[in-house]
Amino acid sequence: LPISLDAFPELTRALRPDSAYDFLVRVAHPWRRQLFVKGRRQTAAQLVADMRANDWDIDRTAAEFDLDRRVVVEALHYCERNQSLIAAEIAEERRRVEPYLYRAPAAR
C-alpha cells in the first residue's frame, strides 16, 4: 500500500482547513466559508452557538443533536481557531437579514 505523507501539514491546513477535521466539511455556499457539520445543514458555529445558548456540555450537545461527541469537540476546536471568520459571517448574515426585519412605524 502506498503511504501518503504530508511534507507540509501546516500549509495543507492553511490551504484546506477541512483537512484537519473528520466531521466538518466544506460545503458549496454563495458566501459562507466556514465548515459545516458533515451530513447536516448546520455550520460548526451554529452548533456551538446552540450549545452555549442552552448552557449544554459536550455530551448533552451530542445527545440533543444525535451526534458523536467527537463532532462537538471538533466544532469547538474549529470555532476557537476561526473566530474572525465566524464573526465576519455573523456580520454578513446580519447585513443580509436586516432589510427584512420588522420595523415599527415612526411616531407622529
Image: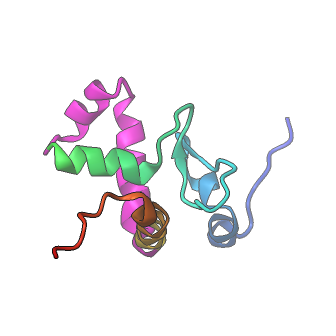
Q: Is residue 6 above or below residue 67?
A: below
Q: Is residue 31 above or below residue 45?
A: below
Direction from residue 89 to residue 63 in the image, left or right: left
Residue in view at x 55 percent, y 42 percent: 22
Q: Nearer the viewer, residue 47 or 93?
A: 93
Q: Is residue 2 above or below residue 78?
A: above
Magenta stretch: dominant secondary structure? helix
Q: Is residue 78 above or below residue 56?
A: below
- Quarter in which the C terminus is drawn: bottom left
Direction from residue 68 to residue 49 in the image, left or right: left
Judge whether residue 64 is colored magenta.
Answer: yes
Residue projecting furthest to the right: 2
Question: Residue 58: horizontal and vertical position, in percent?
Answer: 24, 40
Q: Nearer the viewer, residue 91 or 107?
A: 107
Question: Residue 101: horizontal and vertical position, in percent?
Answer: 35, 59
Residue in view at x 48 percent, y 71 percent: 85
Q: How is the image coloured?
A: rainbow
Residue in view at x 61 percent, y 61 percent: 17
Q: Nearer the viewer, residue 5 or 62?
A: 62
Direction from residue 105 to residue 96 in the image, left or right: right
Question: Residue 106: horizontal and vertical position, in percent?
Answer: 22, 73
The part of the image, by quadrant, that contains residue 8 is: bottom right
Direction from residue 68 to residue 62 in the image, left or right: left
Judge whether residue 30 is colored magenta.
Answer: no
Q: How many marks?
A: 0
Question: Residue 103: horizontal and vertical position, in percent?
Answer: 29, 63
Magenta-colored span: 55-84
Residue projecting furthest to the left: 55
